[in-house]
Amino acid sequence: MAMSTIQFCMVNPMSSVGSGTNRPTFAKVGRIRCQTSEDRTVNKNGEMPQPSSSPSPSTPPPPPPAPKPKVSTKFTDVLAFGGPAPERINGRLAMVGFVSAIAVELANGNDIITQVSNGGVSSFLLVTGILSAASLVPLFKGVSVDSISGQVMSSKAEMWNGRFAMLGLVALVFTEYLKGGPLV
């Protein structure tokens, strides 16, 4: 085991009291010796020699990385309460529903209850079927949601956006009900 030396300094607050200066003085307090797994020695200048480029023959090779757990593609696992599909699909539907509800309100001036009663159910069922199928196909192929997420467009960001869209859609319906008409 090799030893390396680290020197450190500490502030001595009592040294500036009697000297009349307001700046602290530093004093060398001690050395810390650390051990490493390679045999190295410290030369006279306190420096560590550079390690040789050839690895030592006694070091075993690193173990292979552990295989990633396989994602279940069973229907009951994908659509389970804590599974990857239910909240994600509901969040995607809520995002589309909130944006389309506000867009129709701005275009026609109809509140969300009027939109649903004037033929919105068939459009809702069509969009629900398409988005559900598009969300389930990759999950049934074994592709995990986290494996395809990036830094900005991450699976966590999608979940939070879906949750806020669900809250926004409920708040929109509740506000329009209390107001008695469209929000905008």
Image: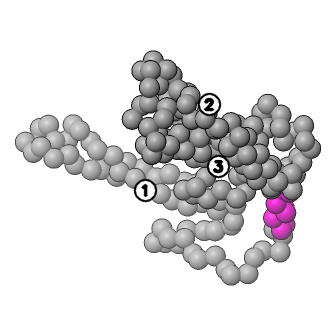
Which residue is drawn at the image coordinates 50% and 43% (left, top)? 104
Q: Amino acid at mark 1?
A: Gln
Residue 143 seen: yes
Tag 1 near tag 2, CB within 8 Å: no
State whether the magenta stretch is mostly helix, strand or loop.
loop
Inspect the image, locate mark 2, and give the three-letter code of the amino acid beneath it. Ser
Circle 1 residue: 7
- Magenta span covers which residues? 60-68
Counting residues from the start of the chain, the first of labels 1 and 2 encountered is 1
The answer to whether residue 135 is visible is no
Packing grade of label 2 (10 A; few <14, some 14-19, many >=20) is: few
* Position of residue 65 in the picture relative to residue 147 (left or right): right
Q: CA distance from mark 1 to mark 2?
A: 78 Å
Question: Helix or strand or loop: what does disc 1 sit on?
Answer: strand
Residue at figure coordinates x 53%, y 39% from the top left:
101
Q: Is residue 65 magenta?
A: yes
The residue singled out by tag 2 in the image is: 117
- Residue at the disc numbered 3: 155
